[in-house]
Image (spheres, rainbow, N blue to C red):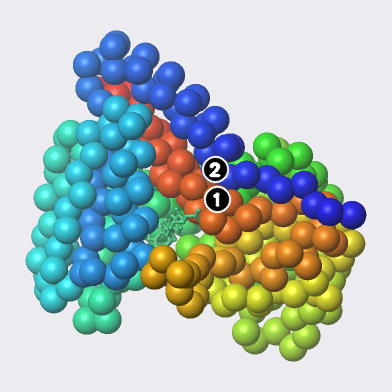
Amino acid sequence: MAAKVISGKEVAQQIRAEIKVEVDELKQKHNVVPGLVTILVGENPASISYVTAKGKTAKELGYNSIQDDQPGDISEEDLLALVDRYNKDDSIHGILVQLPLPKHIDANKVLYAINPDKDVDGFHPVNVGKLVIGEAIFKPCTPAGIQELLIRGGAETKGAHTVIVGRSNIVGKPIANMLIQKGPGANSTVTVVHTGTKDIAYHTKQADILIVAAGQPKAVTADMVKEGAAVIDVGVNRIGMTPEGKAKLVGDVDYEPVKEKASLITPVPGGVGPMTITMLMKNTLAAYKYSLNEK
Ligand code: L34
């Protein structure tokens, strides 16, 4: 059996169109647009690419989008002051500090400084706590994108055994928490495997739904996948060079062989990545709507 490929690019476009309708309507009514600032520290090429895509998408949707680039040697104190400036800026509804941050900055300290009402990444402990309780206002963008792909791709999460490879704060932990909740696109039995797991393949082979966020090419090979599983590949690895001098993008899943075994699979590029950006737009819309209700 060859898997059905779920195009994150197409699903993302569909959701963006839905968002645009809502934004246009609210804009007319309130004469305010959603405001998003992305703070980029340093010159990590991957981060530049992601933040640029976020700004472009925000503009396409009619948002007020600011990309605030800061030098890699900015002090922690200055970065905290910058965050606080946007906390107090009423035209900004969403604040995102792109990760990773340079080593001399305590990333958690910066994330804690963001006003939870503007924390469109959902990384502030208040929002992490709400997520675990099942009262999330901002679901972290990548996990939210994965959940949306599962729903719109027709994967039945309820009662499924979902195995997650990776335990990061950005993907593994939040998606695990989301999928054990009651409700649509959840209600799974969840196993999380990680570098401390004795036999990773033993677990992945039992997965009805396999979510791979390991950060390593070919972390999951075909022998680790159950026939008919739905496979979500969260990895974005840059390897080698194409003849045009560009790095090739591959996921964490050995795509071609796994595709032959799975029932559903997401590609890289064009899978989870575009969904991450779209969910950021959705969270920014939510933050903006929240601010309208406050007035
Ligand atoms: N604060 N930091 C914060 N929030 C986030 O949600 C992120 N993440 C991760 C890294 N750091 C972050 C992202 O934005 C990963 N990530 C992300 C965003 C977009 C894409 C991939 C990862 C994406 O658009 N990927 C494209 C390929 C883009 C390319 O050519 O580089 C894709 O089709 O997969």
**Contact, CB < 8 Å: mark 2 with mark 1?**
yes
Q: Name the residue carrying label 1.
A: 270
Q: Nearer the viewer, residue 225 or 242?
A: 242
Three-letter amino acid code at the position of disc 1: Gly
Image point (73%, 58%), residue name: 231
Ligand 1 visible in quadrant: bottom left
Query: Earlier along the polypeptide chain: callout 2 or callout 1?
Result: 2
Look at the numbered disc 2 and say if its residue's Cβ is closer than 8 Å to ligand 1: yes
Look at the numbered disc 1 and say if its residue's Cβ is closer than 8 Å to ligand 1: yes
Quadrant (top left/top right/bottom left/bottom right) for the N terminus:
bottom right
Quadrant (top left/top right/bottom left/bottom right) for the C terminus:
top left
Image point (77%, 54%), residue name: 230
Mark 1 element type: loop
The part of the image, by quadrant, that contains residue 255 is: bottom right
Q: Name the residue carrying label 2.
A: 9
Lateral position of residue 190 relative to residue 238, left or right:
right
Picture coordinates of residue 43, whole percent (x, y): 23, 69
**Vertical relation: 139 (above or below) 249:** above
**Mark 1 burial class by Cα count in 10 Å: few <14, some 14-19, many 20+:** some
Q: Nearer the viewer, residue 48 or 65?
A: 48
Mark 2 element type: helix
